[in-house]
Amino acid sequence: MNVDKKINLPLKKHIIGLVPASHGGLVRKASQEYGIAESDIIDMSASLNPYGSPFEHSEYGLDLKALFISARDGMYNYPDNRYLDYREAAAGFLGDGISADNIIPGNGSCETIRLVAECMINSGDVVGIPQPTFDEYEQQCRIMGASIRYFEHEGLMDITDEALKEVKILFVCNPNNPTGKLLSRDSILELAKRCEMNSTLLFVDEAFSELADPSQSVADVAATNNHLFVLRSLTKNFAIPGIRLGFGVASLEMAKALNTARLSWNLGSVPDVVGTALLNMEGGCYSKYFVASREMIAEEREYLTERLSGIYGFEPLPSTVNYVFVDIRELLMDSQELTSRLASHGILVRDCSSFYLLDNDYIRIAVRTRGETDRLIQAIGDVLTEAGKDYAEERLKKTIECAGTGLPACRNTCEYYPCHFSGQDCTFCFCPFYPCENPKTGGCWIESTTGSEVWSCEKCIILHKPEVVQEVLQILMSDSDTEDNLKVSWEKVVVPHL
């Protein structure tokens, strides 16, 4: 006898019910699930700098192996928890009068979000999160017992003072993840003024700033404003997701308190050394490396958008950064099915159904190299062809189940109606013989918008002739195997009409 028992854990009740935040970049999981070598998978679900890390470009003078060697001695000692070199490098990277005392080193963005939440939120406090946006804001605040108030990102600048008074922290991702929308510096500063007036902390996540437009950053203002906090990430911008690095920018008073409260030794010797070297690159946000990165992203984003726009059911939306938000509401399949099918072909894109408000209607695709984009488009073509065959099989089953009514199916609500001729029978909306590859039907091979060749049935009318439909149906409704019935109906019914 099975009896449901509640697990008695010595944890806060709200922690037990938490669901993990969703992220892209699950290459190993996809490799195991689909039996594809990790090296054969193209990850367009994680939004990393497609230009690659500076270590892949000798012209920037950074030697990763040499940095690892220089960090080796640090492994035998506790790190200096002040991280003076790293903080000095971060301040120099941003410039604009920011000092090392304004910097809070972080083991990636998530740790810094957790730190601010820990230091501000009491159980029951309300935080404001414009949606859709990065999952970790909500996750880290819920861990602290916060209640969440959602706002629509499109209406962010219209938040009322009454609403701001109710929230302890307002999170703003700029550029926003997953939409790629960048709010201007002036807009953010106007919102910052209103937050300060209402004693609300404005937390601005500028994780993708260097890959979009760093001139829109408000980090310099955060250095003197107790109600404005800015988060920066090295992970995406330098394409080093395996080395967890980031930092926060806050006023001198707030930075001092947060540095006292953060976990001791939160950066190991290797991240400390590597991060310091990266941040010390000449030019900071405007280094030759980032100028080249932004130029490449703009060019390849345009190419990706152009290729996607040519595929029915894909509507890429305007983006300012290294990923493109794509509306697929007109596609036959939803975001979960599409991402799963693409993953089986070794292409990972981000299913956005985990983002609040988005349902199964959107995906996010990272900007990658030209060759990788071409492989994506090819995979989309393959997936659409496969899906067409699968849908044809599903429709065939339903057609057989519904047969016998004696009435011809006339889909005058079909987007292709009238397809071929007056009085046609549309019982078979999807051809059960697709792709027959027989040019005598009127079908032919054409080049698709994805660049591959597909079989087109546009000029074939055979399966819409009422007499053919009835003969084929009679055979398909027999007790024999469906595959066998298809072969018989092709030979006995279709071939004589060719």
Image (cartoon, grey):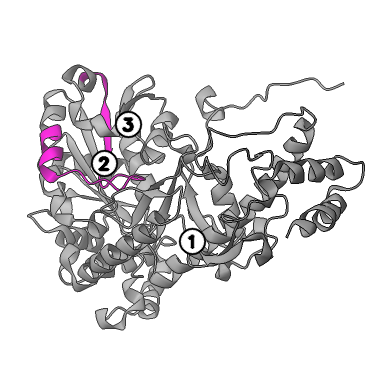
Tell me: residue 377, above or below residue 5.
below
Q: Position of residue 209 (x, y in %)?
A: 24, 54
- Which of the labelled discs sits on residue 43, or is there none? 1
Q: Secondary structure at mark 3?
A: strand
| Residue drawn at the location 83% of the way across and 52% of the way down | 489
Question: Disc 3 marks which residue?
Answer: 129
Q: Which mark is residue 258?
A: 2
Lower sequence index among marks 2 and 3: 3
Which quarter shows the C terminus? bottom right
Q: Nearer the viewer, mark 1 or mark 2?
A: 1
Tell me if residue 347 can be seen. no
Residue 409: x and y in percent read 66, 33
**Which of the 4 image quadrants contains residue 46?**
bottom left
Does residue 178 belong to the magenta stretch? yes
Hey, what amino acid is under mark 3? Answer: Ile
Residue 44 covered by magenta stretch = no
**Residue placed at 33% from the left, 27% from the top?**
121
Q: Is residue 194 left or right of residue 416?
A: left
Nearer the camera: disc 2 or disc 3:
3
- Quadrant of the snapshot with the N terminus: top right
Q: Give residue 430's position: percent from left, percent from top.
A: 65, 46
Residue stretch rendered in magenta on the structure:
165-192
Q: Nearer the viewer, residue 394 or 45?
A: 394
